[in-house]
């Protein structure tokens, strides 16, 4: 991968896409600032599956990495991530804690595995 986005100009770096499933919706702006600051594009799904799985499924397809909160999420959303992410060949991590420090730690570990 050249790091150049499809159709982009030379020197334009393609950001990796991170989906956070669950977590504290009140922290979305803080999540976004943290994740964007670490070079990722950010989207959030609140974990609510009242309208079915389609919305979450589409967001899973969009992502490069999925962080799935275990402390603030529906059981259905967690199950959906665990079932669909491998089928879609998407990397995912289950977070015991959806705090900013928990997310920062997961991304730092992700960066370490990418550079190793």
Image (cartoon, rainbow, N blue to C red):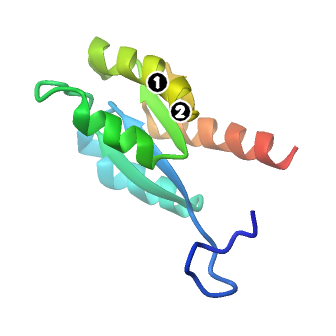
SS for callout 2? helix
* Cα gap from disc 2 to disc 1, whole angstroms: 6 Å
**Could you tell me residue 99's position as x and y percent?**
44, 33
Residue at image position (33%, 42%) is 58
Residue bearing mark 1: 97
In the rendered view, would you say 2 is above or below 40? below
Q: Give the residue displayed 57% in from the left and 42% down from the top.
A: 104
Q: Which residue is mark 2?
A: 102
| Res 110 label | none
The answer to which of 83 and 47 lies nearer the viewer is 83
Could you tell me how many numbered marks the image carries? Answer: 2
Asked whether the residues under the numbered discs 2 and 1 touch, taking CB atoms below 8 Å apart as contact, a structural biologist would say yes
Please determine whether, in this image, residue 64 is positioned above or below residue 87: below
Percent x, y of residue 109: 71, 37
48 vs 20, left or right, is left
Q: Quadrant of the N terminus?
A: bottom right
Q: Is residue 71 visible to us here? A: no
Vertical relation: 49 (above or below) 106: above
Q: Is residue 100 above or below residue 78?
A: below
Residue at 35% of width from left, 43% of height from top?
Answer: 59
Estimate how packed mark 2 is, as few (under 14), some (14 to 19) or many (20 or more) residues with alpha carbons within 10 Å.
some
Observer-nearest of 60 and 40: 60
> Left of 14 or right of it: where is 70?
left
Q: Earlier in the sequence, mark 2 or mark 1?
A: 1
Residue at (43, 30) in percent of width and height: 98
Quadrant housing the C terminus: top right
Q: Seen from this angle, which residue lies furthest right? A: 116
Q: Secondary structure at mark 1?
A: loop
Residue 81: image quadrant is top left
């Amino acid at each position: 991968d050249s790091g150049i986005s499809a159709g982009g100009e030379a020197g334009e770096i393609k950001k990796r896409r991170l989906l956070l499933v669950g977590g504290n919706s009140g922290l979305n702006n803080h999540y976004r600032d943290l994740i964007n600051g670490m070079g990722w594009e950010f989207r959030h799904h609140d974990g609510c599956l009242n309208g079915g799985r389609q919305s979450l499924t589409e967001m899973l397809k969009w992502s490069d990495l999925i962080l799935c909160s275990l402390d603030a999420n529906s059981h259905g959303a967690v199950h959906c991530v665990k079932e669909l992410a491998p089928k879609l060949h998407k990397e995912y991590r289950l977070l015991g804690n959806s705090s900013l420090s928990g997310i920062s730690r997961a991304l730092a570990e992700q960066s370490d595995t990418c550079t190793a």
